[in-house]
Image (cartoon, rainbow, N blue to C red):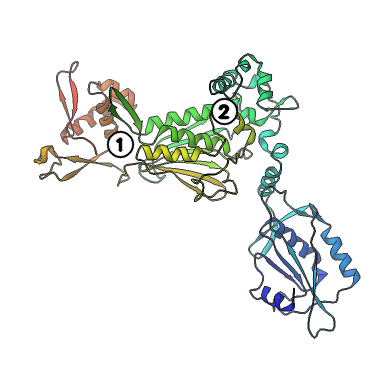
Amino acid sequence: MTIEDIKQLIADDEHRTLELKKTTGELKDGMQSACAFLNTEGGWLIFGIAPTSLKIVGQMVTDNTQRELAQALSGMEPAIDVRAQYIEVPDSEGKQVIALHFDSWEEGLIPYTYQGRPYIRVESTTRLMPREIYDERLRSSNPNKFAWETQVANGITIADLSEERIRNAVRGGITGGRINASAENDSLESLLDKFKLLKDGKITNAAVVLFGKNLYDYPQLMLRMAYFRGKDKLVFIDNKQAEGNFYDLLDAGIAFCFRHLSLSGEVKGLLREEHLEIPIEALREALTNALCHRRYDDPRATVSLAIFDDRLEITNPGHLPVPLTPETIKEPHGSYPYNLRIAQVLYLSTNLERWGTGVSRMVELCREQGVPEPEYMTDGHEVKIVFKKKYQYNSDETKNINNDSDGGNSGGSGGSSGGSMAVVQLSDLQIKICELIKNDSHITVAQMAVDLAVAKRTLERNLADLQKKGILSRTGNTSAGRWMLLKESK
């Protein structure tokens, strides 16, 4: 390195990868910045430059200077091998600039510390690393040792786990050919040991996540669910919270989707196939991933499922693994489970694939049903997957149903001539009424009230409105009659 290289390095002042010090009298501060470089993108630490004026002043370098520098570097943990470069400053009577380069941090390394404290670089400043980042890097460096899921669940015994859930997981693995059939007769303790859910014979947090039934000390084992009117979170129609183990939360989430997503059917041959407006298997895969790969060490964080008029969102606390981004996650990739023990049990029980194919399956399922591909988003603290509905609604208050007029002639309410399209405004409840009648034209008012969880009087008022709008008619008497949809929803 030459003095010209130094001039080029300092031309843009201090920044994320450059720290300037006037002399080694600021050695301690300099080493803190060096530690920050090692924990972020790497960078240069240069002594002999006035930070304010950027003047190259240099300093006299003695044997004592070099010993002090070596001693300061030895305060870094883990140990590093960094060699200082000494560059002569022209016309300065032997003064030199001291330059040291530090490599960037890599995924899987433990965080660096200087004199027992970790530092991180934020723009051009050096700060103490937040505890959350430190713990996360420590965990990723040795998951078997530091991961929350592998820690002993204090006070939890086998009696606090659901035997039914454990046995069902084993049966699923036997059926799928991933667990030996002889395991069906094993004791619970033996099964937990084979699943690697014991540590020194004690129950781990992973076992509680998967099979726990007494969860007083695990507030993070919760799924928040909401159905919102419109396209934002201003007004909700349904708001629920489910508590329980992985399987409890998965069941609750799927049930919530069936409750609030539209169901349609078509006849293929002699069979009738019914589909949710978003493929249920894609939703199951997404919710499984969210519950499996989320961060569990923060008791305040939970997974959420939100349904809007135009989309469904599943959000989990955590981040995408380093090789993946929202743009690349749909491309072929390996498997990078955040919670190795939990993921392994779900793989063995056939609830999860291990080869990074889950996203591809969701994409394919959506394509087959004509639904837009799911989209991923992340801010470094949460990961969100968004499923857009096939048919978009253009109002926060009501949904639009497009209707053809009968035979191109002027039809009932809202009809038009010449085969043109008319728009009739229907509420969410009226949409669901039409869906029930489309699936069963003989359904009774009482049964509809039960299925839709509304008062009979409210239902009758909406049925009358649908008939007034020319959407619906009734033939026959009360007991033997049937409903007719006069205009088919597009």
Which of labels 2 and 1 is toward the front?
A: 2
Badge 1 amino acid: Asp
Disc 1 crowd, CA 10 A, few/some/many (<14, 14-19, 20+): some
Q: Position of residue 302 (x, y in %)?
A: 55, 38
Q: Is residue 430 above or below residue 418?
A: above
Does residue 411 show up? no
Q: Nearer the viewer, residue 409 or 154?
A: 409
Residue appearing at x 85%, y 77% in the figure:
60
Query: Which quadrant of the figure has residue 474?
Result: top left
Q: Position of residue 237 (x, y in %)?
A: 38, 36
Q: Position of residue 243 (x, y in %)?
A: 54, 29
Residue appearing at x 50%, y 46% in the figure:
331
Q: Is residue 364 above or below residue 247?
A: below
Which numbered circle lies on residue 245?
2
Which numbered circle lies on residue 428?
1
Q: Which quadrant is the C terminus positioned in?
A: top left
| SS for callout 2 | loop
